[in-house]
Image (cartoon, helix red, strand yellow):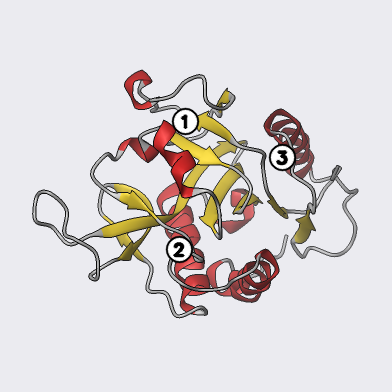
Amino acid sequence: MPQPNQQNNDNSVEWIISNEAVGYEEALAVMEARVAAIAAGTAREAIWLLEHPPLYTAGTSARPEDLVAPDRFPVYEARRGGQYTYHGPGQRVVYVMLDLNRRGRDIRAFVKALESWVITTLADFGIRGEIREGRVGVWVPRPEKTPNPDGSPREDKIAAIGIRLRRWVSFHGISINVEPELEHFSGIVPCGISDRGVTSLVDLGLPVTMEDLDSALMANFDAAFPPQGR
């Protein structure tokens, strides 16, 4: 289990990769400890890449009626922004613990940077990710699919974003669908949006592995979040 490292002279972001599924409560405890240490100046900023066992999380805007199958998987109060989301094997969860005291206390700009990071990473695999006004996350146009009932073009969500700040240090973050069981999303109304679908890299026909995605995330990180000095 990753533990907060003591601050040293290296101000670079620490990348942590967990190769085994991490329970949600365990992950939350580790994040909260790391965020406190970052705020205190005793630990470096960190990006934690992991998978969870199947579970649902409820953000601060979650509506009870959007939990369609409450007994299917464990449900956790996430205390992050957003509504219900699913986490499980085959989905890369990216917990982002960055110090916005150093990077600018602008929440909108921070969310935009997260979206840009995901979009640039997806582009490495030939996927055009897009954002939508009023719908946080990253979407993929699906012109080959039947249009939505209202006649609008089909688009599916490939990445969700939900963050929380404590003393201007971020935690929670992003989930990107690599090859999760997409049917597991049917137990909720993902992010409160009932008229759109969910997709993944493999569902789009791309044989992408977690390692492939991790490498692309690392390669594109500095463009979205330029290195900061103290």
Which picture quadrant has residue 164? top right
Q: Nearer the viewer, residue 152 or 72?
A: 72
Indicate the secondary structure of the residue bearing disc 1.
loop
- Give the residue at the far left of this rendering: 151
- Residue at label 3? 35
Measuring from the top left, give residue 89's x and y in whole percent: 64, 48
For image coordinates 85% across by 65% down, the residue present is: 10
- Residue at label 2? 203
Q: Is 127 located above or below residue 38 in the figure? A: below
Measuring from the top left, give residue 53's x and y in whole percent: 67, 38
Q: Residues within 10 Å of mark 3 (few under 14, many from 20)?
A: many
Instruction: Check disc 2 and give the amino acid type.
Output: Asp
On screen, residue 228 versus residue 125, left or right, reads right
Q: Is residue 117 visible?
A: yes
**Quarter in which the N terminus is drawn:** top right
On screen, residue 158 versus residue 131, left or right, reads right
Measuring from the top left, give residue 63's x and y in whole percent: 35, 23
Q: Is 43 located above or below residue 24 in the figure? A: below
Q: Residues within 10 Å of mark 1 (few under 14, many from 20)?
A: many
Q: Earlier in the sequence, mark 2 or mark 1?
A: 1
Q: Residues within 10 Å of mark 2 (few under 14, many from 20)?
A: some
Q: Earlier in the sequence, mark 3 or mark 1?
A: 3
For image coordinates 79% across by 52% down, the residue present is: 18
Residue 59, labelled with which disc? 1
